Image: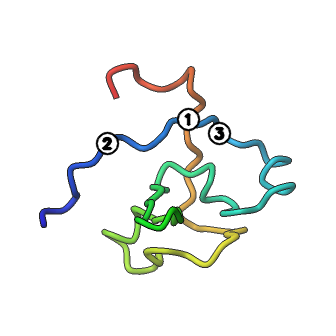
Amino acid sequence: MSWPPAASSPPSRPVPSAAEIAANPANGLCDACVHQRLVPNTRGSVFSLCERSRTDPRFRRYPATPVLRCAGFEPRPAPEQRDPAG
């Protein structure tokens, strides 16, 4: 199997606000981070993968959630700020 696997693009979703993260901290900061990739399994569960873990050993591949602080956190751009080509 080659890495990264050829898969469809992750679902597009709006960046949650700080209040939404606090109210529903499923994955904490990861839900608003550009380095998060959601990985579904065949049983219907969805896991939060940290793409930073590929190049930096300080970051866990599948961090314990909710993540409340992270040195590698970079906010995901709002949908209207995204590059239409990407």
State the image coordinates of residue 58 (x, y, percent, origin top left).
45, 79
In this image, 19 relative to 10: left or right? right
User: Percent x, y for residue 45?
Assistant: 53, 65
Left or right: 75, with 53 as reference point: right
**Residue 62 higher or lower than 30, as above or below:** below
Q: Which mark is residue 8?
A: 2
Using the numbered discs, state the Cα–Cα distance from disc 2 to disc 1 in whole angstroms.
Answer: 20 Å
Report if the CB atoms under discs 1 and 3 are less than 8 Å apart: yes
Q: Quadrant of the C terminus?
A: top left
Q: Secondary structure at mark 2?
A: loop
Pointer 2 or 1: first along the chain: 2
**How far apart are the alpha carbons under marks 1 and 3?**
7 Å
The residue mark sitting in front, 1 or 3, is 3
Q: Which residue is mark 1?
A: 77
Three-letter code for the amino acid on which mark 2 is drawn? Ser
Q: Residue most toward the front?
A: 43
Reading the image, the residue beneath label 3 is 15
Mark 1 residue element: loop
Q: Position of residue 13 (x, y in %)?
A: 58, 37
First of labels 1, 3 by sequence position: 3
- Residue farthest along the left direction in this orientation: 2
The picture places residue 85, in percent across and down from the top left corner, at 32, 22
The residue depicted at 87 percent of the width and 55 percent of the height is 23
- In this rendering, the count of numbered labels is 3
**Measuring 43% from the left and 74% from the top, which residue is drawn there?**
61
Query: Which quadrant: the N terminus?
Result: bottom left
Give the distance between the C-alpha atoms of the residues marked 2 and 3, in whole angstroms: 20 Å
Comparing marks 2 and 1, which lies closer to the viewer? 2
Q: Amino acid at mark 3?
A: Val
